[in-house]
Amino acid sequence: MAKEKTQYTCTDCGGITAKWLGKCPSCNAWNTLIETAVDSAGPAKNRYAGMAALAPASEVAVLCDIEAQDVARTPTGQEELDRVLGGGMVQGGVVLIGGDPGIGKSTLILQAMDGLQRTGKRTLYVTGEESAAQVALRSRRLGLDHSQVQVLAETQLEKVLATADKFQPDVMVMDSIQTVYSDQLTSAPGSVAQVRECAAHLTRMAKATGTAVVLVGHVTKEGALAGPRVLEHMVDTVLYFEGDTHSTYRLVRAIKNRFGAVNEIGVFAMTEKGLKGVSNPSAIFLSQHAEPVPGSCVLVTLEGTRPMLVEIQALVDTGGPSPRRLSVGLDRDRLAMLLAVLHRHAGVACMDQDVFVNAVGGVRISEPAADLAVLLSIQSSLRGKPLPQGFIAFGEVGLAGEVRPAPRGQERLKEAAKLGFTVAIIPKANAPKKPIPGMTVHAVERVDEAIGLVRELGRA
């Protein structure tokens, strides 16, 4: 195939240059020029001719006249993965999954592909990083000795698309998108232009043929998906693998999902036979203390549609001239704000103290409903007195010292009661209308009221 000429297009203003420049000559923006292909016979006509034939143009329709149908889903056999996806794989859907090297992306995808194949779905696993023999060796380690998943070791996009057109798979995996390249471009595999072009072609193929496509992506050292940001906008679902490679547990979080809930998480345990779903994740995020210890408070957080109990631990110690504020699994800037609220509205000063806060189990909590539990754990560590046995808390704390309600408070309380917790401090707006059996609920409006209530419970 003859290679086409290339040009460089600015992602900000659309300006075009014949060669790459550090600064766009049209809008003076830096590092915005990307390589694109130019067809000498016409403006990029031949590059998408095949895709246009597969996807005929649709006619204009009135929104209320369009018949809406529920999206059909195909379970993968991995319950936790299906939860994150919203129930399973969607026909014609494109899923992008990223995570640190060695965290288990390829392992999980191979297990899911084997589960889909066993249900009668045609599967195609395209590997650009390993040989077919290496993939087979991994399947043996996972106990998938008789797996019928079709494997293709190829990195050229045109050959991958030709194979997909020949076999017509129901589900196809591209592991990874950074290794595939198109002959249409002269840049190296993994470059911004190649990743963007290859992902665009695979997405068009998925929409035109109904094949569900899973793209495995590399991440940067900061943990974000490598490549152009347009890659996340292009796909239907974006999943992130989280967790320490030295830990047994892994989290898969949905950052974007057109067919399900956002911020839904799946919890897996890494075993000798691959990744196994954890049915009760609250158990791994709670430390098993024989007796209550200072600085520990259990939070009922909400991840997608799942209420989950997580232990928040705080350690307050004498600091130097510049006390440290460090949080693991929580927003560090929000911790500094909460300490100021604690001082101003509850009279608890930590100005000369080092404050360390940790979410047990490696989970990352982004919702503001963790504020109240963080403050109560800090106050407990500062006084050196533990919170009562079976105690939980949740609620957002504002700068004026008010305790704001958290979404779906009733479900949080029921989950805590189911696991044996008996005392709760929650926002007044989340107070249950009917008593919850076995649980005493204290509803508060301000942070100083919550601190005073905890001191009374400690003396009881």
Image: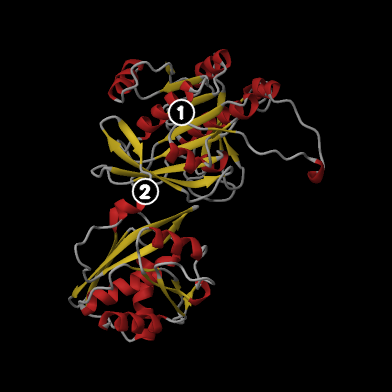
- Residue 439: quarter of image: bottom left
Pick whichever, 204 or 122, lies toward us: 122
Badge 1 element: loop
Residue 18 appears at what percent x and percent y? 56, 33
Q: Which residue is mark 2?
A: 280
Alpha-carbon neighbours of circle 1 within 10 Å: few (<14), some, or many (≥20)? some
Give the quadrant of the N terminus: top right
| Residue at x 65% of width, y 26% of height | 208
Pick whichever, 299 or 108, lies toward us: 299
Q: Left of 69 or right of it: where is 348?
A: left
Residue 258 appears at what percent x and percent y? 58, 44
Marks 1 and 2, how far apart in space?
Answer: 47 Å
Q: Amino acid at mark 2?
A: Asn
Pick whichever, 179 or 309, lies toward us: 309
Residue most extreme to the front: 437
Q: Amino acid at mark 1?
A: Ser
Give the quadrant of the C terminus: bottom left
Label at residue 187: 1
